[in-house]
Image (spheres, rainbow, N blue to C red):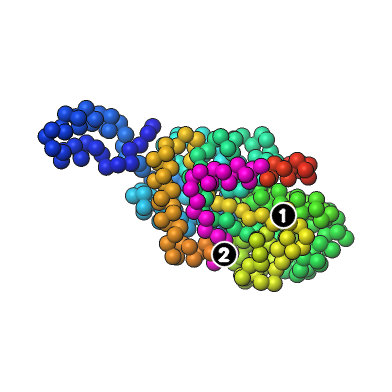
Amino acid sequence: MAYSLLPTPFLACRMAAAAAALACLTAAPHAQAQPAYPAKPVRLIVPFAAGGTTDIIARVVATGAGAALGQPMVVDNKGGAGGALGAQELARQAADGHTLGMATVSTTAAGPAINPRIGYDPLADFTPIINIAATPNVIAVHPGFGVRDYKAFVQLLKTQPGKHSYATAGTGSIGHMQMELFKSLSGAFITHIPYRGSGPALNDTVAGQVPIVFDNLPSALPFIQSGRLVPIVVAAPQRLPQLPGVPTFKEVGLEPVNRMAYYGIVGPKGLPKAVVDKVAAAVRQAADKPDAKKRIEDTGSQLILNTPEQFSAQIRAEFDVYKRVVDTQRLTLE
Ligand code: GLU
């Protein structure tokens, strides 16, 4: 169903001059069939568990975006299968703007690139609205693992192949994909343990169940700053002010792994342009407020807030990058 984003024309008609009354009467039935958007709370599917970066970014903007839209924006965590379950659910919803979803590099690029049977087409099944932020990624270890820098980390993994495991936000997530790429380029061998999101992956790493985690920085940083995780290497254009002693993947000679993650909002395919523009404006307004901006930038992330067309092009380009990685490295889900 299409939604009018203007005040109900019928009300405007009541104030119009008598000469316009006839036109108003003929317009009214059509206008009544198009309630203003949003007509009820907007559900925002987060395809990962609470406590991960997708959840963090969604919650930074949801309250403010809901206020700008005039209806609450309600975060709904649907984690599982590296974000695929939540993305599949979004793809099945009516294109009326009342169900939207967070789209990440995992759900729109890494996952579909490594798993052609993921259950949706990342390019055709969604309507891109706005990319909110780009975030660095990090490999971190439990303090008891005994290594504190990249050289010692790789050396240990190489001398004990297959002995250790690493946690990620799920199968086909960027953490999984980038760690497999790291393994293939560095010659290290470690076993993957997928979780329903970075929240549970971090919890188990901090608890010492798994020694290594590949995560996005916003969710990992508080554990690093409190000494419960030790950062080894980051994916970021340059060293981060938050972690000045930690090298980038580029510095350690692994430039292909040096890619940021992204967090944006999409709707199901066929979302009316007027809805796309209204949601984009509301999210932009919410994320651009000084406190929201600070919360995002304090995690080493960059606010993006691009246009629907730019986000669409970005998803396509990122999917192509990961498809090439999968093909050249012959990465598989097994
Ligand atoms: N690693 C996921 C991504 O960047 C997000 C994980 C999470 O939010 O739990 O797509």
Which is closer to the viewer, label 2 or label 1?
Answer: 1
Is residue 269 located in the magenta-colored stretch of the structure?
no
Find out if the beta carbon at label 2 lies less than 8 Å from the nearest ligand 1 atom.
no
Where, by quadrant of the figure, is residue 243 drawn? Answer: bottom right
| Residue 321 in view in this figure | yes
Q: Report how far apart the C-alphas of labels 2 and 1 lie in the structure.
A: 20 Å
- Judge from the rendering whether residue 6 lies leftward or rightward of residue 159; answer left or right: left
Quarter of the rendering occupied by the C terminus: top right
Quarter of the rendering occupied by the N terminus: top left
**302 shown above or below 86:** below
Q: Dot 2: what SS?
A: loop
Q: Which residues are magenta?
A: 298-320
**88 shown above or below 153:** above
Residue situated furthest left in the rendering:
18
Near mark 1 (Cα within 10 A), the count class, few <14, some 14-19 or many ≥20, is many
* Residue at mark 2: 299
Is residue 307 located in the magenta-colored stretch of the structure?
yes
The three-letter code of the residue at mark 1 reads Val
**39 shown above or below 227:** above
Q: How many marks?
A: 2
* Residue at mark 1: 257
- Judge from the rendering whether residue 271 lies leftward or rightward of residue 246; answer left or right: left
> Horizontal and vertical percent for residue 30?
28, 29
Q: Residue at x 72, y 54 (%)?
A: 257
The three-letter code of the residue at mark 2 reads Thr
Q: Residue at x 70, y 63 (%)?
A: 248
Find out if the beta carbon at label 1 lies less than 8 Å from the nearest ligand 1 atom.
no
> Horizontal and vertical percent for residue 72?
38, 50
- Judge from the rendering whether residue 15 lies leftward or rightward of residue 293; answer left or right: left
